[in-house]
Image (cartoon, grey):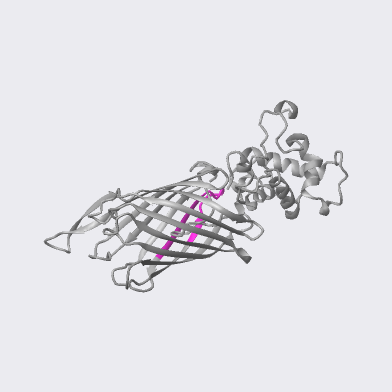
C-alpha cells in the first residue's frame, strides 16, 4: 500500500537504485556488487538528486519539475511495509497500480540489494517513535489491532433466528480512523441496523425497524513497539454514547467507558497474532452490567505469485463475561479470511462466521463481512 507521496518517490527510487548498479561511484569506491551496502549505493548514485541528508535537491538543480520526496519525513518513510517498496522496485509500477513509467528492475538488482537500500532510506527518519509499517498486520473482524492507522471500515453482520424472539436482524457500523503524531489515532464508530419486530398479535409476523446505534469515540496510543521483536502494544480509551434506540435493541441506554489493550506479534513463516483485552464500564449499572472481554487472533498471510493478491485466513477466539455473581464466560469462534481487492492493496475485504461455542441458548450464529479502505494510500478508485 503506497501513499500519494510514494508516486513521486518510487520512480526516483527505482531509477537511482538502478543507476547505482550501472554508474561508477562518485567520490566513494564501491565494493563488489553483492557486497554493496544500502548506504554505499545511495551515496554513489542517489545523493546527487536526493541530497546527502535525504531531504532532496531543488528542482532547479536536478532539471525536472517533479519535487523530490523528503526521506526525513517520518510519517512518509515509516508507514509502508518493506514488501510494498520492494514490489514496485522489483516488478515495476503496475504491480501496485502505478504508472508503467516505473519499470521493473528485478533482473538488474537482487532482492537483497533492494532490501539494503530500503533499510538505508528508513534511517533518514531518525525518530524511533514511529512504528514500522511491517507491524501493520491484517485486521480481524472483531479484535482491535495495535497498529495506529488511517482507515475507513464498513462492517455488516447478518443474524437469523434472533437470540430473544427469533427475529432476524442486520447490523452494520462505519469506523473512521485517523492517525495523528507518531503513535496516536482518533477513532469514530457509527453503528446502525435493521431489526424485525414481531407483531404483538401474531409473533410469526412482523415489521422491520431501523436505527442508528450507540456512537463511540476513542483515542488509541501505541505505547511500545519493536521491529526487532516483531511486536507492538497499544492502549485505547473509548466512550460509547447512548444514541441508539434502546427499546428496539439498538443501544444500551447509558454511556459506556471501554478501556482496552491491544497486542500484535509477527510470527515465523508469515503467521501473525493479535490479542485484545479490556472492560465495558457503564455509567448506569442499573441499565447494563460491567463486562470484561478477551479476544485473540491467529492468522497467516500468503500472496498469489511473488507480488499478487494477499490472502490472510484467520481464526478468532472471543470471550466475554459480565462481572456479576454467577455469570459465565461466553466463548465464540470466528473463522474468516481477508483478501486484498486491488493491485495497490489498500482496498480489502474480510468475510467470516461467528459461532457460539458454549451457552448457545439466546446466542445465534452471525455471518460477518467488512470492506476496508486504507485512505491514506489513495482514493477508492485508484490502484485497480
Residue at screen point 75% across, 27% down: 61
In percent of width and height, residue 213 lies at 31, 51
Q: Looking at the image, which is closer to me, 220 or 23?
A: 220
Residue 274 appearing in the image: yes
Q: Hey, which residue is sitting farthest top in the picture? A: 60
Q: Is residue 275 above or below residue 132?
A: below
Q: Looking at the image, which is closer to me, 285 or 20?
A: 285
Q: Hey, which quadrant is residue 306 in on the image?
A: bottom right
Q: Hey, which quadrant is residue 271 in on the image?
A: bottom right
In percent of width and height, residue 209 lies at 23, 52
Q: Is residue 196 above or below residue 3?
A: below
**Left or right side of 359 for 334:** right
Q: Hey, which residue is sitting farthest left in the picture? A: 201
**Left or right side of 140 for 246:** left
Q: Hey, which quadrant is residue 11 in on the image?
A: top right
Residue 101 appearing in the image: no
In percent of width and height, residue 107 lies at 75, 51
**Left or right side of 151 for 114:** right
Q: Hey, which residue is sitting farthest right in the picture? A: 29
In percent of width and height, residue 20 lies at 79, 43
Q: What secondary structure is the magenta-colored segment mainly? A: strand
- Say whether residue 37 is magenta: no
Q: Looking at the image, which is closer to me, 95 or 12?
A: 12
Q: Which residues are magenta?
A: 337-353
Q: Looking at the image, which is closer to me, 370 or 103?
A: 370
- Say whether residue 341 is magenta: yes
Amino acid at each position: 500500500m503506497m501513499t500519494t507521496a510514494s508516486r513521486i518517490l518510487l520512480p526516483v527510487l527505482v531509477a537511482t537504485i538502478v543507476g547505482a548498479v550501472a554508474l561508477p561511484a562518485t567520490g566513494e569506491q564501491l565494493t563488489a556488487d553483492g557486497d554493496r551496502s544500502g548506504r554505499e549505493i545511495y551515496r554513489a548514485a542517489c545523493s546527487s538528486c536526493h541530497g546527502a541528508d535525504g531531504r532532496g535537491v531543488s528542482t532547479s538543480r536536478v532539471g525536472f519539475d517533479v519535487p523530490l520526496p523528503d526521506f526525513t519525513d517520518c510519517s512518509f518513510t515509516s508507514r509502508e511495509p518493506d514488501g510494498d517498496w520492494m514490489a514496485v522496485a522489483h516488478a515495476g509500477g503496475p504491480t501496485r497500480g502505478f504508472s508503467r513509467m516505473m519499470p521493473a528492475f528485478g533482473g538488474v538488482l537482487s532482492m537483497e540489494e533492494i532490501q539494503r537500500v530500503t533499510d538505508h532510506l528508513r534511517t533518514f527518519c531518525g525518530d524511533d517513535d514511529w512504528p514500522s509499517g511491517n507491524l501493520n498486520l491484517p485486521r480481524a473482524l472483531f479484535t482491535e489491532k495495535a497498529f495506529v492507522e488511517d482507515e475507513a471500515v464498513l462492517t455488516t453482520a447478518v443474524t437469523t433466528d434472533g437470540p430473544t424472539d427469533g427475529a432476524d436482524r442486520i447490523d452494520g457500523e462505519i469506523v473512521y480512523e485517523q492517525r495523528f503524531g507518531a503513535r496516536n489515532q482518533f477513532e469514530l464508530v457509527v453503528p446502525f441496523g435493521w431489526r424485525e419486530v414481531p407483531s404483538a398479535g401474531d409473533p410469526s409476523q412482523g415489521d422491520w425497524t431501523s436505527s442508528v446505534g450507540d456512537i463511540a469515540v476513542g483515542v488509541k496510543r501505541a505505547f511500545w513497539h519493536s521491529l526487532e521483536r516483531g511486536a507492538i502494544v497499544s492502549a485505547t480509551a473509548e466512550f460509547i454514547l447512548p444514541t441508539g434506540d434502546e427499546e428496539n435493541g439498538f443501544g444500551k441506554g447509558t454511556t459506556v467507558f471501554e478501556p482496552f489493550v491491544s497486542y500484535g506479534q509477527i510470527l515465523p513463516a508469515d503467521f501473525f497474532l493479535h490479542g485484545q483485552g479490556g472492560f465495558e464500564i457503564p455509567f448506569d449499572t442499573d441499565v447494563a452490567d460491567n463486562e470484561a472481554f478477551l479476544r485473540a487472533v491467529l492468522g497467516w498471510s500468503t500472496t498469489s505469485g511473488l507480488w499478487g493478491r494477499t490472502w490472510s485466513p484467520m481464526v478468532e477466539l472471543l470471550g466475554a463475561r459480565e462481572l456479576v455473581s454467577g455469570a459465565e464466560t461466553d466463548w465464540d469462534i470466528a473463522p474468516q479470511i481477508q483478501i486484498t481487492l486491488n493491485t495497490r492493496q489498500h482496498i480489502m475485504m474480510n468475510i467470516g462466521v461467528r459461532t457460539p461455542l458454549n451457552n448457545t441458548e439466546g446466542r445465534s450464529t452471525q455471518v460477518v463481512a467488512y470492506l476496508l479502505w486504507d485512505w491514506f494510500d489513495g482514493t477508492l478508485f485508484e490502484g485497480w
